[in-house]
Image: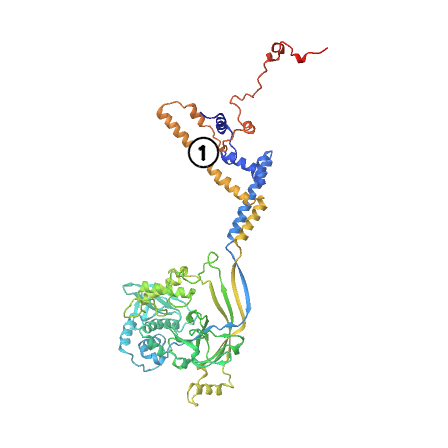
Amino acid sequence: AMAPGKKITARIKRTLPVRGPQAPTLSELMRWYCLNTNTHGCRRIVVSRGRLRRFIWILLTLSAVGLILWQCAELLLNYYTASVSVTVQFQKLPFPAVTICNINPYKYSSMKDYLSELDKETKKALETFYGFSEGKSKVRRSVDEWNSTGSDFFKQIPLLKFEDFSKTATDLHSGQKRKIEGSVFHKDSSIVNSGDSNDIIGFQLCDANNSSDCALYTFSSGVNAIQEWYKLHYMNIMAQIPLETKEKASYSADDLLLTCFFDGLSCDKRHFTRFHHPLHGNCYTFNSGENGTILSTSTGGSEYGLQVVLYIDEADYNPFLVTSTGAKIIVHDQNEYPFIEDIGTEIETAAATSIGMHFTRSRKLSKPYSDCTETGADIPVENLYNKSYSLQICLHSCFQKAMVDSCGCAQYAQPLPAGAEYCNYNKNPNWMYCYYRLHEKFVKEQLGCQHICKDACSFKEWALTTSIAQWPSTVSEDWMLRVLSWDKGQKINKKLNKTDLANLMVFYKDLNERFISENPANTLVILLSNFGGQLGLWMSCSVVCVIEIVEVFFIDSLSIVMRCQWQKAKKWWNGRKRDQSGKPPQASDLERQGHDNPACIDEDLPTFNTALRLPLPQDNHLPRTPPPNYSTLRLETAFTEQLPDTLEVG
């Protein structure tokens, strides 16, 4: 049998109204929270008298909650912003690498045998379309391999002349007119058209596997059309020539460099490193750092930079490949690949070109602040250039990989991937059509390279300021050219032409190193402080308040919902069992259906305060004191005889 104290405790647990976090309903829980929370607005909603005042407090509390949510959202959005700081330091600066290339990649006299068929076709086009003729020029025959290969291919991809924007064209090779089918890609140019403005020059490329799939590439300028057509065949020819042969046909350091000074001291070809560029031939890099030493300068100004005089040799230029004379240079870091074809600066002949530099180092924050990469290791594109990562390296490598995958060979202007070879007529007759189609997709960002490749987080930049002056001057031209001719090893009576020379100066304008860096505008401490300020301003709330809100609105509310669902399921299950057995509900079952107060989990006996909180009986009769038994007031019947000690003594 249960002890009397435990029976009373069990009955109180079943009948005592439940309040606080264990309330049976959400409304009771919310009422308890509003009466006991430290947020004043919620309490005023419950204790305020009158509907108007309660409505005003509800409106103010909801407005404060909305402002808190808005301000906290702004804080979260601004958490991943960065502030830019610029630091200027005055110190001794490392001198950058300076790469110099002749605009003409190869000596025309050395490459003429390989290009004879192509040059003959080009001259024929000029004579046919524009009436240009050099007379009976003697063109040396090339090696039989180049002769046969070139002639066959020139017949397949001849230059075409379209009249009045129609698709009827005159074939250069046969001289006959024919109907041309295919989609047209017109490439405009700012160069003035030569000849009739209604005549358009171009060429047709067709899929070798499907002759009906063709594309027409037209140009409003005959100059651009002939140059593009020439370069197309030129790259095909150069891809088949061994690298050693091309290096010998290009300019040596002795050919290109006449004089050299750095930081006021003389320098020579030993300070330059040669590398072969597919489009620019032999190029030479000053201060490449290849031997582990990087030169620096402690003084700004043109006298303390790099000064070189270049020999251009204009007479040995390819007349169809390049139309300008001079050199190209690029200033870059020692670990950076020189993309001279993209961002190179051209140097004029018969002029002194001064290039002043400002050095800037930049550092960006990586994710989640910006979408940049630290080393490029997270970019799924193989680096083909063996240099530190840059956006250009990624884009060129991505296109070359797509070229190999789509066309079966590599494009000549970019490095070879492992196991691939350059495209040529013999092994890849369809490569031109494939290359142009692929390049069109690349420009339109349909290959996905622009989405895959990212900017580097840290990089160095040299801002260049270029100025040009006539050089040599009229009064010093004669003796200077004679001295340079003598230095070149020529006879004294055969002086150089000033259009063969270019004077270049590269120097720091000042020794100010600018360091641009991004720093987080917010830290976790600042974010939490801002959150606390917003909560205290609008709701007079603290961290304890926030924990209380989480406990009541999430943990306790979920517990109440789950408990209600469990009670419903339990009631349904008990009813189903009674229906199956046919027994009426027992009193014990009804008693178990009452509220069991989970707050009374201890074994202590009920107190007077808990007893006062017991509900009234169902008949709502107020408890009354029972009437006294008036028979007890009859003292004479209870005490018939007087006690001796109460008697009065006379």
Q: Is residue 102 above or below residue 26?
A: below
Q: Residue at x 43, y 32 (%)?
A: 567
**Coloration mode:** rainbow
Query: Which residue is depicted at the point 32% across and 63% down?
Result: 405
Label count reads: 1
Hey, which quadrant is residue 291 in on the image? Answer: bottom left
Quick one: quadrant of the N terminus?
Answer: top left
The part of the image, by quadrant, that contains residue 60 is top right
Q: Position of residue 404 (x, y in %)?
A: 32, 65
590 lies left or right of 133: right
In this rendering, position of residue 245 left or right of residue 270: left
Q: Quadrant of residue 44?
A: top right
Residue at the right extreme, as displayed? 650
- Looking at the image, which residue sits at the far bottom? 493
Of residues 543 and 514, the one drawn nearer to the viewer in this rendering:
543
Q: Residue 274 appears at what percent x and percent y? A: 40, 76
Whole-percent x, y for residue 42 in the image? 56, 39
Characterize the local packing of mark 1: few (<14), some (14-19) or many (20 or more) Cα atoms within 10 angstroms: some
Amino acid type of the residue that numbered disc 1 sits on in the rendered structure:
Cys
Q: Residue 498 placed where, x, y %?
A: 46, 83
Can residue 123 be seen here?
A: no
- The answer to which of 324 and 632 lies nearer the viewer is 632
Q: Is residue 68 left or right of residue 138?
A: right
If the image is split into quadrants, where does the C terminus sit? Answer: top right
Q: Which residue is mark 1?
A: 564
Please say whether residue 611 is visible from this viewpoint. yes
Q: Describe the element under mark 1 as helix, strand or loop.
A: helix
In this view, the residue in front, 21 or 323, is 21
Q: Which residue sits at x=51%, y=80%?
A: 264
Compared to residue 368, the image places residue 461 above or below, namely: below
